[in-house]
């Protein structure tokens, strides 16, 4: 699947509680480094003609305002946990200004949650101002959003199936602690792999820092970024010094441009 040049923006890079975490005064939550301020995980994927967002967590409205996203073509969901879909109601602003329903791509498990949590958007009796959604059920088969090719990759979040996505040479995986060999093959050849790394200590349903590093290196991806980070990971500056070449912590606002050569706005 041929892919146009893409710009990837990390809208949020934190775990479900965000960083700083409510009521926490640890060194990370008290940090003045902007890279330690992490909204719930989400990315923006843009070609010259198409804009999509992966997941609409509780911070979706603020993420769109902060990035000044005036036009959005689609939402692609990874899984039905609240920190990845709770902000979908705010899509109605794009309905209003775009004068059309929003394309929403989700697997059957996530679709069930969307229909339950946002029942009013799917009701037969509709009232003005509710979200207008064009829901499209996806599987592991590739699909297109405008001119952007999307290859779903099934991963495991303990016992929950979650979808990662490959957009051309860029692969994004969040909320995973296991990937089967057949799905790993879909990642190989990527220029960039983003994968969740919750903390350094073992966790039931997320990769640790060491596990994420091992995954990136084993797939021989030239550049890896870590996301879905908790305050338990440590300070961005300190952890960055421990990482091997070719692997970095992501942070809110990080932008990547993928053509033949990867460029970044790293500070």
Image (cartoon, helix red, strand yellow):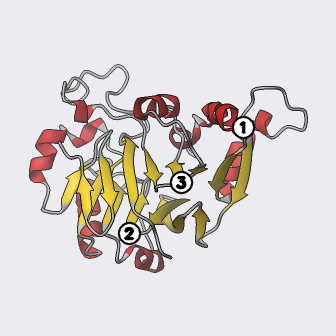
Q: Nearer the viewer, residue 254 or 123?
A: 254
Viewer can see residue 2: yes
Identify whether 257 is placed above or below 86.
below
Q: Give the crowd class for mark 2: few <14, some 14-19, many >=20 residues within 10 Å.
A: many
Quarter where residue 88 is shown: top right
Circle 2 sits on which residue? 169
Mark toward the viewer: 1 or 2: 1
Q: Choose the circle earlier in sequence order: 1 or 3.
A: 3
Q: In which quarter of the image is residue 105?
A: bottom right
Per the rendering, the mark at residue 99 is 1
Check disc 3: other Cα within 10 Å, few if <14, some if 14-19, many if 20+: some
For image coordinates 41% across by 30% down, the residue present is 66
Front residue of this view, candidates 20 and 157? 20
Q: In this view, does 31 lie to the left or right of 99?
A: left
Q: In this view, does 8 lie above or below 14?
A: below
> Please, what secondary structure does the residue beneath circle 2 have?
loop
Q: In this view, does 50 lie to the left or right of 43?
A: right
Work out how far the residue at label 1 is from the one at label 2, CA to CA, in angstroms. Answer: 32 Å
Identify the residue shown where x is 13% and y is 40%. Answer: 237
* Mark 2 and mark 3 residues within 8 Å of each other at the beta carbon: no
The kind of secondary structure element at disc 3 is loop
Q: Mark 3 points at which residue?
A: 50
């Amino acid at each position: 699947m041929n892919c146009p040049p893409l710009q990837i923006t990390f809208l949020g890079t934190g775990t479900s509680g965000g960083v700083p975490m409510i009521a926490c005064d640890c060194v990370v939550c008290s940090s003045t480094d902007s890279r330690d301020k992490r909204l719930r995980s989400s990315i923006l994927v843009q070609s010259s003609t198409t804009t999509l967002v992966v997941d609409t967590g509780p911070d979706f409205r603020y993420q769109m305002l902060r990035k000044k996203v005036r036009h959005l073509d689609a939402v692609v969901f990874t899984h039905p946990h609240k920190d990845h879909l709770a902000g979908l109601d705010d899509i109605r602003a794009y309905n209003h200004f775009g004068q059309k329903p929003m394309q929403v791509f989700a697997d059957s498990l996530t679709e069930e949650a969307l229909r339950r949590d946002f029942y009013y958007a799917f009701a037969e009796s509709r009232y003005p101002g509710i979200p207008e959604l064009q829901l499209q059920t996806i599987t592991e088969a590739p699909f297109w959003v405008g001119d952007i090719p999307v290859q779903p990759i099934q991963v495991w979040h303990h016992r929950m199936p979650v979808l990662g996505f490959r957009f051309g040479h860029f692969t994004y995986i969040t909320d995973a602690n296991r990937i089967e060999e057949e799905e790993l093959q879909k990642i190989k050849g990527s220029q960039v792999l983003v994968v969740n790394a919750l903390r350094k200590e073992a966790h039931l349903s997320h990769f640790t820092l060491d596990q994420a590093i091992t995954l990136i290196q084993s797939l021989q991806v030239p550049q890896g970024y870590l996301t879905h980070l908790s305050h338990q990971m440590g300070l961005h500056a300190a952890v960055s010094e421990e990482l091997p070449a070719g692997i970095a912590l992501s942070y809110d606002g990080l932008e990547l441009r993928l053509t033949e050569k990867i460029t970044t706005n790293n500070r």
